[in-house]
Image (cartoon, grey):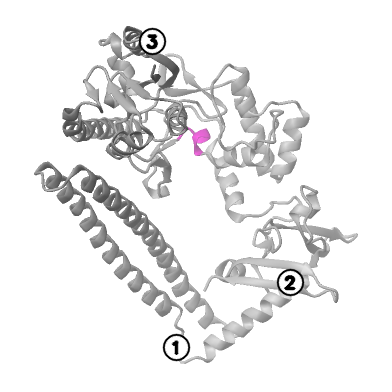
Amino acid sequence: MPKVAIYCRLSIEDKDKAENDSSASIQNQKAMLRDYCHERDWEIYDIYVDDGYSGIDRSRPEFNRMLRDCETGKIDIVLCKDQSRFSRDTVIVEKYINDKFLEWGIRFIGVADNADTENESYSTMRLFTSAYNEMYVKDISSKIRRTLAYKREQGQFIASFAPYGYQIDPEDKHHLVIDEETAPVVRIIFDMYVSGEGYRRIVQELNTDGIVSPTEYKRQKGSKYVNTNADTSNAHGLWTQSTVARILHNEVYTGTLVQGKSHHISYKNKKRKQVEQAEWVRIPNAHEQIIDAETWSRTQERLNSHGRVGKRSQELPPLSGKVRCACCGRPMKRNIYYNKAKTIKYYGMQCATYKTGAMNCPNKSSISGLILEKHILDELNIIVEQFCNADEIKLADIHSEQLKELNRRLSTLEDRHKTAKERLVKVYKEKLDGLLSDDDYAMFRKSLNDEENDLAEQVAEVSKLISVCRKRQENAEGQKALIRQYTHFDKLDRNIADEFIDYVEIGESGKNGEREIHIHWKL
């Protein structure tokens, strides 16, 4: 008696259709396939259900569990309502139904569309059915993207969960209203930060006061929200510094709806790709603000400075936010010592990891801020002298050549990418014309798909490098003008640090107290 795996699937877009086609529901799929097995006295090994998953999704949990059971020889027949329930991805259909299932001795049956791998006519129709199913998903995906883009441009909130401080309007699911229970907490966070408090102090205050974190708050309200960015070790619903940082960076609290920050790579690949900030959809006054414009402006000014706004001094230190530990990569924090006149007598910098005790970092010793500034000044003056003694400052020229080379690479890759896509179409036409066998088509399609995906990734990567190079070229032009104004720097200030220094790495203290200092210049 054969052992049967019953597989049922229903995607989100199919749920709307299920209202008119009762057989599409999960329960009716199960009932239909159970009856099919009982009529033939087949043993049902297990029933696998993926509810709410697209047929193009390769990460379906139950689908992959079924495939593992197939590979280990536990199953003789895979039974679905039709082939599209199994997959709408042509590559997956070919890989398993036409390859692996034959290798594992497994028969595939789709009841509604008479799909059966023991039927010779099925092999002829399989590719056409697969192509149609994949085109269906692509068309649905395109329509959904257009609909979501339109809603974003109309200022409609389209996410499933409201940001902390807001809730979805009961009368309009595309509109946000203030959550009176959590909005005051958001105001406290902004007020504390603007007044000079750091992330750590804000977190301590919130946790001490017993205010639950946003994720825990949603859970207590019965929400199914899952924070994919959450620290898995934090099982007590406590606030973290990363949570506070996300709130302080979120423009939604000014009443501006910001959406379209990322999108799926393609209808087949559900990994998300970040969108350039200039392309985000921003709709001012889309809902009531929690934070006023002045508070938001002061918050962003401090965030962009990468430093503290202390009560004793409003002037940002020259190296604030630019010094890192070479051992663990964490920032180096300032230890400040004051004299009786309340002016800075001495300051040192120490690894934040060791200082806070979060983990054991071997870079324990602090380094004098004055010694570090002098070292940087000495290195900078050497660079200035070299540039000023040269016949011509070639910073921008170097980046110009790099930019030309990157543009040449991009043009070549785009041509190759276009050719790969054309070859995919050509191979498919040859298959339809009978010039290629099923095996040859599957082999060529996989190879060309891999090539096309690889080239697409290379095009994206080179485009990103071009953007970085252009920014460096612009910086270099400004640096040339600045260098020409000086022949020697006597003091390191914030303007000079911002112009020339990306970041500085400090290594461990040696036996003689010497430290390895590596300066990453913006050159």
Residue at image location 61% in from the left, 28% down from the top: 215
Q: Residues within 10 Å of mark 2 (few under 14, many from 20)?
A: some
Of the residues shown, which amino acid type is indicated by label 3?
Gln
Cα distance in 3D space between marks 1 and 3: 77 Å
Residue at image location 17% in from the left, 31% down from the top: 125
Disc 1, disc 2: CB below 8 Å? Answer: no
Residue at the extreme left of the image, as rendered:
433
Cα distance in 3D space between marks 2 and 3: 70 Å
Measuring from the top left, give residue 285's x and y in whole percent.
43, 32
Q: Is residue 56 above or below residue 407?
A: above
Of the residues shown, which amino acid type is indicated by label 2?
Leu
User: Is any atom of residue 412 visible in this view?
Assistant: yes
* Residue 255 on the magenta span: yes
Of the residues shown, which amino acid type is indicated by label 1?
Glu
Residue at image location 79% in from the left, 60% down from the top: 362
Q: Which residue is mark 2?
A: 372
Q: Is residue 504 above or below residue 422?
A: below
- First in residue order: circle 1 vs circle 2: 2
Q: Secondary structure at mark 3?
A: helix
Q: Left of 321 or right of it: where is 19?
A: left
Residue 27: image tag: 3
Where residue 130 sits, quadrant-wise, is top left
Which range is magenta? Answer: 251-256
Q: Secondary structure at mark 2?
A: helix
Q: Which residue is mark 1?
A: 392
Cα distance in 3D space between marks 1 and 2: 30 Å
